[in-house]
Image (cartoon, rainbow, N blue to C red):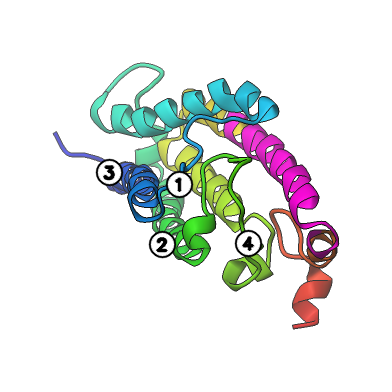
Amino acid sequence: MTIDWPVGTLTLTVWAYWSTVFLLVFYKRIRYGQRAGVVPRQRREKRLWLGVCAVFLAWNTLPALAAYLDHGPFSLPDWAVSVPAVYATRCTAAVVGVVCYLATLSCWLLMGRNWSMAIVPSQKTELVTGGLFGLVRHPIYSLSILLMLCSALVVSNLPMILIATLHVSVMNFKANIEEQHLTERHGPSYLSYCQRVGRFLPRLGGLIGR
């Protein structure tokens, strides 16, 4: 069986993405002796946990199913391969997905010990504003959303589109929770940062002023 190139590339990219997340969790525990927030402690984040788990499981499963299934709602639609323009778009989306992963990796490395999957109230963190954080407040979430949109384009079936919709909602709620926490933790310095930098997209004025 020949695996569709865009789906195969996307599947490996998503698996690499989440494998890196779990490596970072273990590294933080071993290197710094700190929790990485795998299990949320903050009340509002706990409410999001089922959504996060659903996205994680579906995102790691649906592309692989599309790669191997020939029929059914979880398979790749025939038109996604047979229509040249659609196939070219899917190939482009797969390449963009790889770029998203590499850009996210740079953000993880920049955050260092300040990175965590969820808020860990007992841990002190520094405000990171360099690199891509100088363009948007949540570049990791922005890139995650873009990678998910690429996934929806590459897989092109209804289950993947529904998961992409859920993912965007979860990221927005999670960013809102974290911003409230960071405002309490860093006060005026974070509020000033929020005024200069957009949440998920760069602010035009900030780009012109650079």
Q: Which of marks 2 and 3 is in front?
A: 2
Q: Name the residue under label 4.
A: 126
Q: Residue shown at 42%/26% (left/top)?
A: 58
How far apart, in angstroms, are the residues tagged by discs 1 and 4? Answer: 15 Å
User: Quick one: SS at disc 4?
Assistant: loop
Return the x and y of residue 190 as percentages of the image width and height: 78, 60
Within-10-Å neighbours for mark 2: few <14, some 14–19, many 20+ = some
From the image, which quarter does the N terminus lie in?
top left
Amino acid carrying mark 2 in the image: Leu
Within-10-Å neighbours for mark 4: few <14, some 14–19, many 20+ = few
Left or right: 36 with respect to 179?
left
| Numbered tag placed on residue 78 in the rendering | none
Task: Determine if residue 103 is in view.
Answer: yes
Q: Earlier in the sequence, mark 1 or mark 3?
A: 3
| Extent of the magenta region | 166-190
Q: Which of marks 2 and 4 is nearer the N terminus?
A: 2
Q: Is 55 rendered above or below residue 179?
A: above
Q: Residue shown at 27%/33% (left/top)?
A: 67
Amino acid carrying mark 1 in the image: Gln
Q: Is 51 rendered above or below residue 169?
A: above
Q: Residue shown at 76%/59% (left/top)?
A: 198
- Determine the residue located farthest toward the left in the rendered image: 1
Amino acid carrying mark 3 in the image: Gly
Q: Mark 2 points at which residue?
A: 102
Q: Which of marks 1 and 4 is nearer the N terminus?
A: 1
Q: Quadrant of residue 129?
A: bottom right
Q: Which of marks 1 and 2 is nearer the N terminus?
A: 1
Q: Quadrant of residue 192?
A: bottom right
Amino acid carrying mark 4 in the image: Glu
User: Quick one: SS at disc 1?
Assistant: loop
Q: Is 184 rendered above or below residue 2?
A: below
